[in-house]
Image (spheres, rainbow, N blue to C red):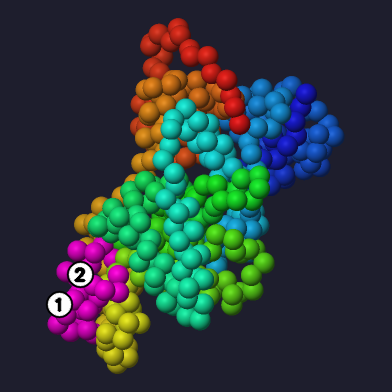
């Protein structure tokens, strides 16, 4: 039996319109719609074409859909410039649904520690109940609590701390405006399931990457149940500002700021903040603006700082941006290696989901080097396979 829904979820995964897919198959947009609604069963030659376009086995389309729809589109925290793109939203939903299904299957073979990020969300709600009349204080306390629970000692290690606490971080070639986005997947009862952070890879410095992680962590902690899809522009900007404030508070705790700023000779000179950037792995502008919001520098110094920043052309690239190494996500690759070493060959995992290797590589944006290390070479004997029952 042909399952048209599988065509729809794959088309969304690739961000492809019906017309674009129809052009690839040399058929009409209407025919694609009939496939997806299971009104018409494609000829075998078109099933094979679908397999080639989407990089899955032909049997994928003849198998009952097993990719769970766990990602609420309305809960994805896109940056404001991209939030109106429904096509982009559907693409993100489909990608996370595939990633969640694969990860959950892999993790079913291991005993996992409870998610610290769920605990952090619970703690944040308690803070909100205690402090109901001062949102900035709620954010400050929540960021302080998050840093403590994650045991962040060095901002350079924030990515590791976030992954270790239960988040799944994936790099993608996003648009320049998107930067990053995040979402909690959901269980059937709508309770929080797994936190995902998708990081853009274009034109990012190490400190920008760290701030993006802290910003998306802010959304996951402060806004797990917000319907971003229905927000007015002003409300959306407010939530974005809250995530920015959370990131600044997390990376530069309030209690250390007076000591930090005592080392700055001239508050209006960006270069005087470079030693702080080197130590805390935050941008010059983040340091200065955090100090300004805490009342540690004057409005006049703040004004002159931004004028000098513009004059020195630090708006696009700052000192140390080239020298500082960008940290890469490693949790999902580590999971795949563990599964490959202890449970089943990676190639068997690919077969279990009726994918081609290229597809699973694109789900997680694995490098060609990693994929090459996980797949058997042509001259390697592969006689035995572990019997594995797929459970979802």
CB within 8 Å, label 2 to label 1: yes
Q: Would residue 201 be found to the left or right of residue 91 on screen?
A: left
Residue 36 placement: quadrant: top right
Residue bounds of the magenta highlight: 253-282
Residue 64 placement: quadrant: top right
Residue 354 seen in the current view: yes
- Which numbered disc flags the more N-terminal residue, 2 or 1? 1
Query: Which mark, residue 103?
Result: none
Residue 144 placement: quadrant: bottom left
Q: Quadrant of the C terminus?
A: top right
Q: What is the crowding at mark 1: few (fewer than 14 residues within 10 Å), some, or many (at least 20)? A: few
Residue farthest to the bottom?
300
Q: Which residue, given by chain and number where applicable, does mark 1 sit on?
A: 263
Along the line of sight, which residue is nearer the eye, 326 or 384?
384
Find residue 98 and report its horizontal and vertical position in percent: 57, 39
Q: Would residue 287 be found to the left or right of residue 99 on screen?
A: left
Q: Residue at x 40, y 34 (%)?
A: 335
């Amino acid at each position: 039996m042909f399952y048209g829904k599988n065509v729809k979820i794959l088309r969304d995964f690739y961000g492809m319109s019906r017309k674009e897919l129809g052009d690839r198959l040399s058929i009409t947009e209407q025919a694609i719609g009939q496939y997806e609604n299971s009104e018409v069963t494609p000829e075998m030659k078109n099933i094979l074409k679908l397999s080639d376009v989407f990089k899955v086995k032909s049997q994928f389309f003849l198998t009952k859909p097993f990719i769970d729809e766990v990602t609420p589109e309305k809960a994805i925290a896109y940056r404001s410039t991209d939030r109106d793109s429904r096509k982009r939203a559907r693409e993100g939903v489909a990608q996370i649904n595939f990633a969640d299904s694969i990860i959950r299957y892999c993790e079913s073979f291991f005993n996992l520690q409870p998610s610290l990020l769920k605990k952090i969300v619970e703690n944040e709600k308690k803070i909100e109940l205690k402090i109901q009349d001062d949102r900035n204080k709620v954010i400050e306390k929540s960021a302080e609590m998050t840093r403590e629970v994650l045991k962040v000692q060095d901002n350079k290690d924030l990515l590791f701390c976030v992954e270790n606490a239960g988040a799944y971080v994936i790099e993608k070639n996003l648009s320049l405006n998107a930067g990053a986005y995040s979402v909690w997947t959901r269980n059937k009862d709508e309770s929080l399931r797994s936190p995902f952070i998708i990081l853009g890879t274009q034109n990012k410095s190490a400190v920008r990457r760290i701030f993006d992680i802290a910003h998306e962590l802010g959304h996951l902690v402060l806004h797990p149940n917000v319907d971003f899809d229905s927000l007015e522009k002003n409300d959306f900007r407010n939530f974005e500002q809250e995530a920015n404030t959370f990131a600044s508070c997390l990376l530069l705790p309030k209690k250390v700021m007076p000591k930090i700023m005592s080392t700055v000779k001239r508050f209006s000179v960006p270069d005087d903040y470079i030693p702080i950037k080197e130590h805390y792995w935050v941008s010059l502008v983040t340091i200065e603006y955090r100090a300004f919001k805490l009342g540690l520098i004057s409005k006049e110094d703040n004004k002159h700082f931004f004028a000098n920043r513009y004059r020195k052309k630090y708006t696009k690239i700052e000192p140390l941006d080239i020298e500082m190494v960008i940290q890469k996500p490693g949790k999902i690759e580590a999971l795949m290696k563990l599964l490959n070493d202890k449970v089943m060959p990676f190639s068997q995992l690919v077969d279990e989901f009726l994918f081609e290797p290229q597809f699973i590589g694109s789900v997680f944006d694995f490098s060609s080097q990693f994929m090459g290390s996980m797949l058997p070479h042509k001259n390697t004997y592969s006689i035995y396979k572990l019997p594995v029952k797929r459970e979802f």
